[in-house]
Amino acid sequence: MYERHAEYMLGVCYRYTKSMSDAEDVLQDGFIKVFKNLHQYKSDGELGAWIRRIMVNTAINYLKQQSRTRADLSFSEANLHPVASDNPEINLTVKELAELIRQLPTGYQTIFNLHAVEGYTHVEIGELLGIHEGTSRSQYARARGLLVTWIKKNALENKMPVYAKSRL
Amino acid sequence: MQKADFEKNVQEKMQELRFQPSQEVWKRVEAGITPQRRRRPMVIWFLFAGLLLAGGSFYFISTSSNKNISANKLQQPGQAIAEKQETKTEKQNTSTGTLPENESPSAENKQQVGTSKLSTIDLTQSKRERTNKKQDQTLPLKPNESKQERSFKREDGVADIPASSDQTVVESRNFRVAIPIDQHSSVSINNFGKDLLSAGEATGIDLLSEPISASTATNNPPVKKMNWQFGITAAGGIADLADQLLQSASAANLYFDPLQSPGGGAVRPKPSDVEKGAFLSVGAFANKTLGRKWKLGLGLGYQYFSNTIKVGEKVDSAAFVNQNNFSLDRVNQYYKSTGNNTYHNQYHFISLPINVQWQFAKHFTWENGLIAARMIKTNALHYDGVSGRYYEDDELFNKYQLSASSAVLFAFHKNKIQVGPQFQYVFTNLMKPSTGNPKHLRSVSIKANIELWKN
């Protein structure tokens, strides 16, 4: 089971963290939870989806435990970013796009991943993170706007931001 | 491109994101899921050792008792029970070196046996022999008289003691020995055999080889010991919630909070501290005597634990709550976390205690027990640290609990009432492992055992 799901789950963890080392820590904790709670898995659902949900929860948990991320994982409206409503074409590789998402502030990054990638509704995100639904919406809009700006800029310059590129 | 397409495009690309984890990750996962031996509290091992010791003692006593009874049946001619009672007259006469008249053969049946039911046998012969030996050290010998001769002369006038109805009377020369048929008197029989043999050695008589005849044997039932005691027990005190045996539950660990960061961005209400509540226990017991100082007890009872928390107002509407990292549940009503209303978490159990009592001093007994209990009802609240809601869910509790108790009891009123402090610790987790919240109930109380009848 580990061999079958580990690569994909590391990709999930990678999107929520800022380094591969952190992602592997989350992966490790997540799989320990998976194995210890395997008896709770109900066969009517897809195993991969169940593991993925555990990974997401573990990642969020991990982020909050890291003191250095506390400031980032703020959902305050202090640092407002412009909201972009346009929809640029994404001419990026998978890893380049993942790297851009990881450049978002942690709060934005978390909400963007939960909504755009995992498909959580803003109500569910609010429940999960303990924030108001409206906060989740606005945070997502700003995260999206920032990401669209970067994608457009990348399309114009046909290159990634230097700070993002260096992480690949 | 529509807005939804952007998210869909991102989602599709992210589904393809894969990385090969390093080998170290699997090693750490493997290490993390390998079952680790949990250190059991010492008190648990002590209780198990106590139960084992008590069981072993009971088995040993039962086995040795049966062996002695069998051996006694085979060796009756050489054995008897000594009754260590002598009249003052005897002592006085012995000390003066003269025999009283009532010890002459014509004065048979005048001497009375002691009043104790179990002390049915007279061994005045051997006792007198020992007394005479002492006397010989002080009285001068007559010419041509040996110590042995003088002893025999004195013993010629031994009294014929009437045996009680529970005795088999064995005659040997000038003294008569009664062997009790009581099967519970094995230890005394052994001791008496030694006394008898030593008396034989002193007098030069081979008691085992002398012709002995059993004159009487009755079929009266053996004297019964009071082996079972029945009664009621009750305890009252305080209860609380603990992380470990001697560590009170910390509020921070009382609830599910996936983000677990007080300093984090999201402002989430903290759960209430858990304050102490009442503890009550009532039941009935049956104690089996294992020995002079040991008893094994079984019982059936009811136990009540409680603790208190502060909650907000009750909301009668459906809401989602996070039970743990993996499951979300829907509840029809909940309590808000902010508020100053006192809420009593109550836990009701049916209990089956088994305990061992050791009387370590005249009126004091140390009682250690194991209690298996089944939770029959609870209204205890869980806290969801994400939404800040208190909610009820019976299914999150372990219904079967195992606890250990220890009490020091003071006995009075002919040992029919025992009273003393008791400590009880439920060492199984209060909640199921899936909650990730291993709490334990514990209590300190005053316990009373009241014996109602014996059998």
Image (cartoon, coloured by chain):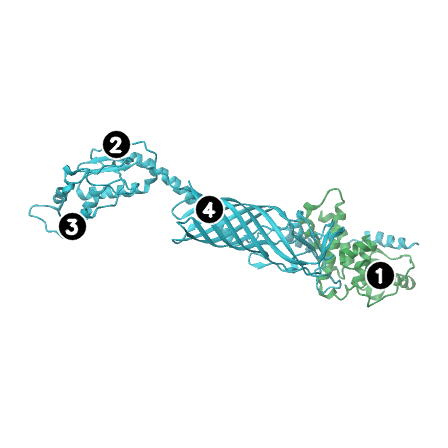
What separation in Å lies between label 2 and label 1 (alpha carbons)? 107 Å
Question: Residue beneath label 2, please?
Answer: B216
Residue B52 has which mark?
A: 4
Q: In the rendering, at what x and y percent does residue B353 appear? A: 51, 46
Within 10 angstroms of label 4, few (less than 14), some, or many (20 or more) residues?
Answer: few
Q: Chain of mark 2?
A: B
Residue A138 has which mark?
A: 1
The answer to whether any part of residue B16 appears in the image is: no
What separation in Å lies between label 2 and label 3 (alpha carbons)? 34 Å
Q: Amino acid at mark 2?
A: Thr
What separation in Å lies between label 1 and label 3 (alpha carbons)? 113 Å
Compared across the picture, whether B279 is left or right of A64 comes to left
Please identify which colour was used for chain B in the image: cyan
**Mark in front: 1 vs 3:** 3
In-front residue for pair A88/B149: B149
Q: Chain of mark 1?
A: A
